Amino acid sequence: MATHIAIIDFETANSRSNSACQIGVVLLDNWHIVGEREWLIRPQRMYFSPQCIRVHGITARDCLNSPQWDSVWSELHPFIDGRVLIAHNVGFDAAVLQGTCQSYDIAVPQFDLQCTRLIAKRTWPGQSGYGLAAIAERLNIRFRHHNALEDARACAGIAMAAAETTGANDLDSLEDKLGLTRGRIWVDQIRQPRTVRRTRIETVAEPQARYQPKLFRTDGTPTNSKTEQIRRTRLRADAILAGCEDSRPLAGKHVVLMHSLLGMQREDAVSFLIKLGATVQDKINLQTHYLIMGTISEMDAQTESTSLPAEVETSKHNENEAKVEQVAQRIQEGQPIRILSQRQLLACIPSALAIARGDG
């Protein structure tokens, strides 16, 4: 059964999630483009940061006579209604959609979400980078980066190439082949798409038994269930978010995350940072405020130690070292950027350290 898809891409006037200034949309049916639209949007607050202008080239003058979001939404909603929303790093675009709708008191209807970055990582593993430009270059997709419609077209090209590579007839089949589950956006909530952990059988011919460290529930009952570990890390993250109440302690901050946080899977850690108000970036640039060192969760460590080729593991290590060196160089050049450990990050968030230690 065919899945109807809407590829979306937002550009923003500044670091706030409610500052959409451009959106591009490409419709896919049966892996064929059947429609596309692009809108310039006049933000409620007409502040265009120099950093964002450098990225996409859109200025306040360009959007001065453009419709505001409520007018755009009246055209956009029927265009994408009933479709799965896909974007590259979909957490960012979902946050902009949600934030911009909230600023106009528009309730976001329920949409399923999927991410071409996750699709690309599972379709072509072991590559040096999975940013939109890097993947498009490897696939010989030519486009003008940071134009919303051009980015949406490139994203559509990646999805179609992944379907061709895997032989997937529709999105359901592609997700099954790659081990992906959809996320969802509705009203004031965003759930990120996720990767399903590959089993040992999928990665080696003759699986060998591995020691699984015991975990303990609060009542002292031992368990070695990964599901239990995931549940506990989510509860801890939810408690920290609840402690922030209506505040967004990382609002306006652009961050690059190495590894993960609080033992969560990386996709959950990215979602956690977005809910705290941060804009999560793939690469360090002039907008970046923090490089967050993070930690490797126990589950990720076990998976990486058994399923990643040595050369890929070495490449990841070298890439992380290069990020630290890049930050040091930028600090010398005068950029106000900091390296934060997980503990330093949590110290910026109300009650987070106590909750992480189990005191909250």
Image (spheres, rainbow, N blue to C red):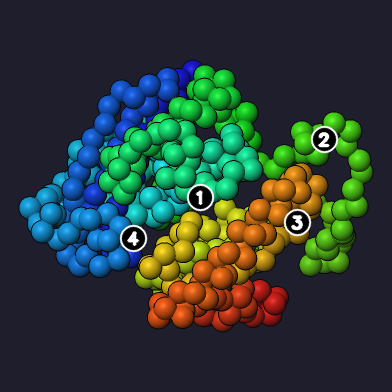
Q: Amino acid at mark 4?
A: Ser
Kind of residue sitting beneath label 2: Val
Which residue is denoted by mark 1 in the rendering?
A: 191
Above or below, 258 relative to 212: below
| Mark 4 or 1, closer to the camera | 4
Left or right: 290, with 16 as reference point: right
Q: Earlier in the sequence, mark 4 or mark 1?
A: 4
What is the CA distance from the residue labelled 4 to the residue labelled 3? 33 Å
Residue under the image location 45 percent in, 74 percent down: 330
Q: Which residue is mark 3?
A: 301
Q: Residue at x 19, y 51 (%)?
A: 41
* Residue that label 4 marks: 17
Nearer to us: label 1 or label 3 = 3
Whichever of labels 4 and 3 marks the residue nearer the N terminus, that label is 4
Residue 204 is labelled as 2
- Residue at left 42%, top 68%? 288
> Which one is in front, 55 or 64?
55
